[in-house]
Amino acid sequence: MSGWLCIAGLGPGDPHLVTPEVTAAIDAATDVVGYIPYVARIAPRAGLTLHPSDNRVELDRAAAALAMAAAGRQVVVVSSGDPGVFAMASAVFEALENQPDWQQLDIRVLPGITAMLAAAARAGAPLGHDFCAINLSDNLKPASLIEARVRAAAEADFAMAFYNPRSASRPHTFGRILALLRSICGPDRLITFARAVSTPDEQIRTVSLAEATPEMADMRTVVLVGNAATRRVGRFVYTPRSAV
């Protein structure tokens, strides 16, 4: 097969945070496939076809990209952040399971800087010790499973990063997560709201759980919750690397 497929991370927003490896793949591509706002970040040029699609058709998007690569096209599937973190890499491999003839394709996953890590860097080092990442959207899993995972992580004293904390279609669920965290972690635990990191709209705010409200988060916000040892130093927040 002469075609190839790269699954690439565009980073959190600032074009300077896109890796040279990803830039080179996009420059060599004949086709770029992805969710509408992510494809909009790719500059049009001669010889490049852009394929934007809705955010709820991940498997269809993945299958279409694989079919193009199998037909000899040079295809880049783009995600924000890193493609392996709540993004398109897993969707491509899930689609690949059903197509044995495509499993010999030249497929590469190109990492990117995640919103979680960009947010942590802006705040200081709140993920400096053991941490976990949880997607709070219930589009692909039940709310009961999300709450069970948050409870388990809080009881194990992980620092936590939350993606997709609050949307227009589920404005009240994040409030339940905050109440759960307060009941386990106490009111003084530090929580950072990092919105639109690395873009002109960036906002970083750290408060205690007692001060946190659901309205502080939206779908452009990554929420970072510290562990029991997380503390402030000057304007920064950090979690020490020593065990607690």
Image (spheres, helix red, strand yellow):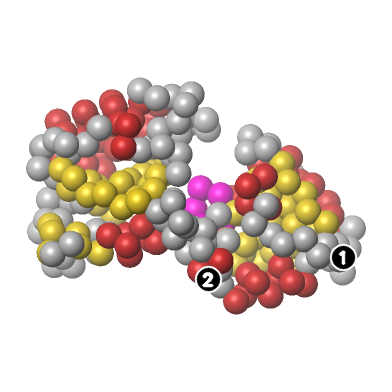
How far from the left and from the top, in percent, is residue 213? 25, 32
Find the residue positioned furthest to the front: 200
Determine which of the numbered discs, if any, sits on residue 16 in the image. Answer: 2
Q: Inspect the image, locate mark 1, and give the three-letter code of the amino acid beneath it.
A: Gly
**Above or below 235: residue 142:** above
Determine which of the numbered discs, if any, sits on residue 187 in the image. Answer: none
Please name the residue shown 83% across and 51% down the image.
Answer: 67
Determine which of the numbered discs, if any, sits on residue 47 in the image. Answer: 1
Residue stretch in magenta: 81-87
Find the residue positioned furthest to the right: 71
**Residue 105 seen anywhere in this rendered image of the structure:** no
Side of 43 relative to 178 (left or right):
right
Helix, strand or loop under label 1: loop
Please name the residue shown 68% across and 52% down the image.
Answer: 39
Instruction: Tell whether position 83 is magenta.
Output: yes
Q: Residues within 10 Å of mark 1 (few under 14, many from 20)?
A: few
